[in-house]
């Protein structure tokens, strides 16, 4: 996740079309996904190609950008091989489900209520 964060953040923030639209790219605390916050209000279908290209980009890297003691507070927590493996898995999934409308919807579940009556939120 950390290596994907570095590589894709580098890609997004250098992409000529999108770099000025990116507000945030980073992993969810549970490490099961990423948040991408862009300026404006877009339908998920409008950023399909951006997401696909971002994950396809990972294969091109021979080292993780910024994975040094100077640039990253947890520079030892990188694994380029696993980043490439997961990026291929996800990009294959996106390509194979391009026409599946469900990939454009955030999964909906019933919101958990804590013992003291608060709704649970993970972000
Ligand atoms: Zn880092």
Image (cartoon, helix red, strand yellow):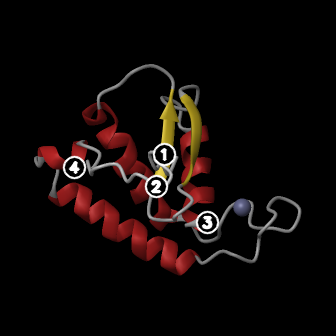
Q: Which residue is mark 4?
A: 103
From the viewer's perspective, is 43 left or right of 63? left
Element under label 3? helix
Tag in front: 1 or 3: 1
- Disc on the earlier residue, 4 or 2: 4
Which numbered disc covers residue 2? 3
Q: Residues within 10 Å of mark 4 (few under 14, many from 20)?
A: some
Where does ligand 1 appear, by image quarter?
Answer: bottom right
Identify the residue shown where x is 37% and y is 54%.
Answer: 112
Image height check: is 67 above or below 97? below
Q: Nearer the viewer, mark 1 or mark 4?
A: 1
Q: Residue at x 16, y 55 (%)?
A: 97
Badge 1 vs badge 2, beta-carbon distance below 8 Å: yes
Residue marked by disc 2: 114
Question: In the rendered image, which residue does mark 1 sit on?
Answer: 118
Q: CA distance from mark 1 to mark 2?
A: 5 Å
């Amino acid at each position: 996740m950390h290596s994907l964060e570095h590589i894709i953040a580098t890609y997004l923030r250098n992409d000529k079309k999108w770099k000025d639209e990116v507000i945030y790219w980073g992993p969810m605390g549970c490490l099961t996904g990423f948040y991408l916050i862009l300026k404006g209000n877009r339908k998920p279908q409008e950023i399909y190609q951006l997401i696909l290209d971002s994950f396809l980009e990972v294969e091109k890297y021979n080292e993780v950008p910024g994975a040094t003691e100077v640039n990253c507070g947890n520079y030892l927590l990188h694994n380029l091989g696993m980043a490439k493996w997961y990026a291929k898995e996800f990009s294959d999934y996106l390509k194979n489900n391009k026409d599946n409308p469900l990939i454009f919807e955030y999964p909906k579940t019933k919101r958990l209520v804590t013992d003291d009556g608060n709704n649970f939120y993970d972000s």
